[in-house]
Image (spheres, rainbow, N blue to C red):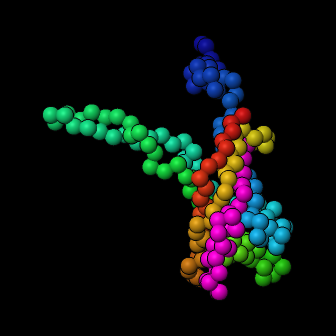
Amino acid sequence: MANTLSHLPHILNVESGRNKYDPVHSIFEVYFTLPAAIQSQFKTEELLLTEQVTKVSGLDALQKTTEAGEQKFFGVTVSYLQPTLDTTAASLAMTFNLNLRNVTDNFVLRVFRAWENLSYNLADGTRSIKTGYISDNLRIAEANRNGDIWRSYIFHNIMLTKVDGLDELNYEDKEARVLNVELRCDYWDDETA
């Protein structure tokens, strides 16, 4: 009797299994460049932000296509692609771990609070123009399990548009607190190895 276990079709007939293709996992790093106005104040924290990012969303904005439109003729629908996109901008959302350095220094929050204050400082009403509140670039690199980068995105002229996640205090919550941040940019470079 032949050993049928050595001829499983999901191994022998599937090229990805037979050739040991590695699946894509969420292995990534985010490299920040803060706005010039706060870079010198947060040089150390700029590097530490990379370690605190746990989630990034909004990357589907990089694969945009025009939406479908339609016309009606005698009750019949004819579909076509719209001539323009709804938006060409990308809005990214990130989640950060919050940690206290030196017992009381919530450094992630301090960085984003200072960045927020560049656009509109609630304490004194000061504002700055776009060259003052944007970051030159933000890089996200995706890698395989060995750390080889297979895709890299570089976003340019990054604006901070939202900081939240600190709205509620709850003794019943067992999870560590996080900070949610939203960023927006108008253009980027997308490189796949």
Q: Measured from the top left, where is residue 97 in percent x and y?
A: 69, 67
Left or right: residue 36 versus residue 66 is right
* In magenta stretch: residue 15: no
Q: Residue at x 39, y 40 (%)?
A: 82
Residue sitting nearer the eye, 85 or 180 = 85
Q: Residue at x 29, y 39 (%)?
A: 70
Left or right: residue 28 versus residue 76 is right
Tell me: residue 58, above or below residue 76.
below
Tell me: residue 168, above or below residue 24.
below
Whether residue 69 is visible: yes
Tell me: residue 16, above or below residue 128.
above
Magenta residues, as a range? Answer: 118-143
* In magenta stretch: residue 119: yes
Tell me: residue 2, above or below residue 146.
above
For residue 111, which quarter of the picture?
Answer: bottom right
Q: Residue at x 81, y 70 (%)?
A: 42
For residue 178, which quarter of the picture?
Answer: bottom right
Q: Measured from the top left, where is residue 9 in percent x and y?
A: 56, 21
Residue sitting nearer the eye, 22 or 122 = 122
Which quadrant is home to the N terminus?
top right
Residue sitting nearer the eye, 152 or 82 = 82
